Image (cartoon, helix red, strand yellow):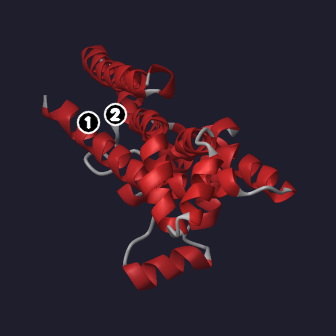
Amino acid sequence: MQSIMIPLFLSVKVAVWATMINLVLGIAFGWYLSRKRSFCRQVLDVMATLPMVLPPTVLGYYLLVLFGNKTGLSKWLEANFGFGLVFSLNGAIIAAAIVTFPLVFKPARAAFESVDEQLQQVGWVLGVSKSAVFFRVFLPLAWRGILAGLLLGFVRALGEFGATLMVAGSIPGKTQTLSIAIYDAVQAGQDAEVNQLVLLISVVCIAVLSLAYYLSPKRA
C-alpha cells in the first residue's frame, strides 16, 4: 500500500501546483486574447496551444535545453532561489503546467468570449473600473467554463508522463509519479502493483472528468 500511496501523493502534489499556476496564467492569457483584435492574437494563440500537439518527449527536451545545468537560467534559479528544475519535483510541476496550459487557456478564452461585450460597455458607462468589470461581470459569468478547463488540466497533469520523465526522471519517493511508477512496474514485471496503480488512476480520472462534464457550460 505504501508503494502506491507515495506516487499518488506526488502525482496529486504535481497536479495541484500545476493547476494553481495555470489558474493564474490561463485565465490571464485567456482574458487577454479574448479582448485582443489583431494578427498577433493568432500567433499567440498558436504558441499557447503548441504544448497540446507537440510530442511530450519533444516538449521535455525543450525544457531540458532551457533549464539544463549548462544554461544561465538554471544557474540564476540556483543562485536566487536555491533549487534547480532538472531531476526534481519542481521540474515535474513546471513540465505538467506547460503540458496542461492549453487545456485551461482554451476553455477560459472561449468562456470569456461567450460573455456579451455590451455588459463591459455598460459597466464603463456606469463608471465601473476595468478590473471591477472583470471580477464582478465576466468572471462570474465565465466561471463554469474556466472551472471545467481547470479540472481537465488537473486530471491531465495527474497522468502526465513524457515531459515529466524527461525533465524530472524517475526517482522513487522524489519524482516518481503514478504514471512513471506504472511504467517502471511494467518494466519490472510487477503485474499486481501495475493493476492497483492503473485502477487507482483510472477511478480518479473518471471522477474528475464526470465533474468537468457536469460543470461544462452546455449543462449550465
Give the number of the disc on residue 75: none
Viewed as shown, does residue 191 lie left or right of 87?
left
- Where disc 1 sits, the SS reads helix
Q: Nearer the viewer, residue 119 or 64?
A: 119
Of the image marks 1 and 2, the number of the one nearer the N terminus: 1
Verify CB contact (< 8 Å) between mark 1 and mark 2.
yes
**Can residue 86 be seen by looking at this rendering?**
no
- Where disc 2 sits, the SS reads helix
Q: Amino acid at mark 1?
A: Leu
**Can residue 39 be seen by looking at this rendering?**
yes
**What crowding class fits label 1: few (fewer than 14 Cα within 10 Å), some (14-19), or many (20 or more)?**
many
Q: Amino acid at mark 2?
A: Leu
Q: CA distance from mark 1 to mark 2?
A: 6 Å
Residue for badge 2: 178
Q: Quadrant of the C terminus?
A: top left
Q: Quadrant of the N terminus?
A: top left
Figure quadrant of residue 182: top left
Residue for badge 1: 8
